[in-house]
Image (cartoon, rainbow, N blue to C red):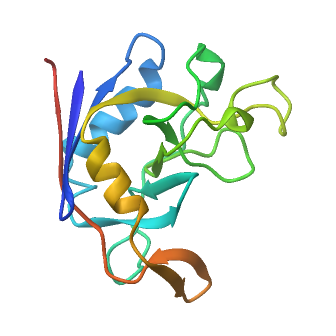
Amino acid sequence: MKATLTTNKGTIVIELNAEAAPITCANFKRYADEGHFNGTIFHRVIPNFMIQGGGFTPDMEQKSTHENIQNEASNGLTNVTGSIAMARTPDPHSASSQFFINLTDNDFLNFRDESQAGFGYCVFGQTVEGMDTVNAIAGVPTGSSGHHQDVPTEAVVIETVVVSED
């Protein structure tokens, strides 16, 4: 499966790994098919770390989500440059719609054990086209918006996300 993210900064194509992360990929596809991601923003951008999106509108309103999913971080995939992983709260099984794309190898985010501190963040795919777009997003100026930090000062909009079987 491939996910094509069309943004106002360019296109990103991600090869989703449904074999390693079936629950996570099905969840991502569900949100994409429902149009949930359309018009959301990359609301958290930290150079040399990651870009995060999938949950907020340009006015920083958080979108409602479906139930949280099981964390599949023990699937053998790692948080390497260009990989996509699920964002979550400190609860290991709290991922819903938000995701991030790693800008560097973030080994400290990988699964180590089933403790709260060691569970890690589930990787479910890899960028195969558009790292130039990912890096362009990583370079935008950021600031604060309400109680949120690292928010792009000019909205980086995810216009559409289309998941296809090819």
- Nearer-the-camera pick, 162 or 23: 162
Question: In what quadrant of the picture does the N terminus appear?
Answer: top left
In the rendered view, would you say 37 is above or below 145?
A: above
Residue occupying image coordinates x 28% and y 47%: 132
Q: Quadrant of residue 17?
A: top left
In the rendered view, would you say 125 is above or below 97?
A: above
Residue 125 relative to residue 117: left or right:
left
Q: How many marks?
A: 0
Question: In what quadrant of the picture does the C terminus appear?
Answer: top left
Residue occupying image coordinates x 39% and y 28%: 126
Residue 67 relative to residue 165: left or right:
right
- Nearer-the-camera pick, 131 or 26: 131
Residue occupying image coordinates x 82% and y 32%: 118
- Nearer-the-camera pick, 123 or 81: 81
The residue lying furthest to the top in this view is: 19
Q: Quadrant of residue 68?
A: top right
Q: Quadrant of residue 117?
A: top right
In the rendered view, would you say 31 is above or below 69?
A: below
In the rendered view, would you say 160 is above or below 56?
A: above
User: Residue 8 at x, y = what percent?
Assistant: 18, 65
User: Residue 144 at x, y = what percent?
Assistant: 55, 85
User: Residue 41 at x, y = what percent?
Assistant: 33, 66
User: Residue 165 at x, y = what percent?
Assistant: 16, 19
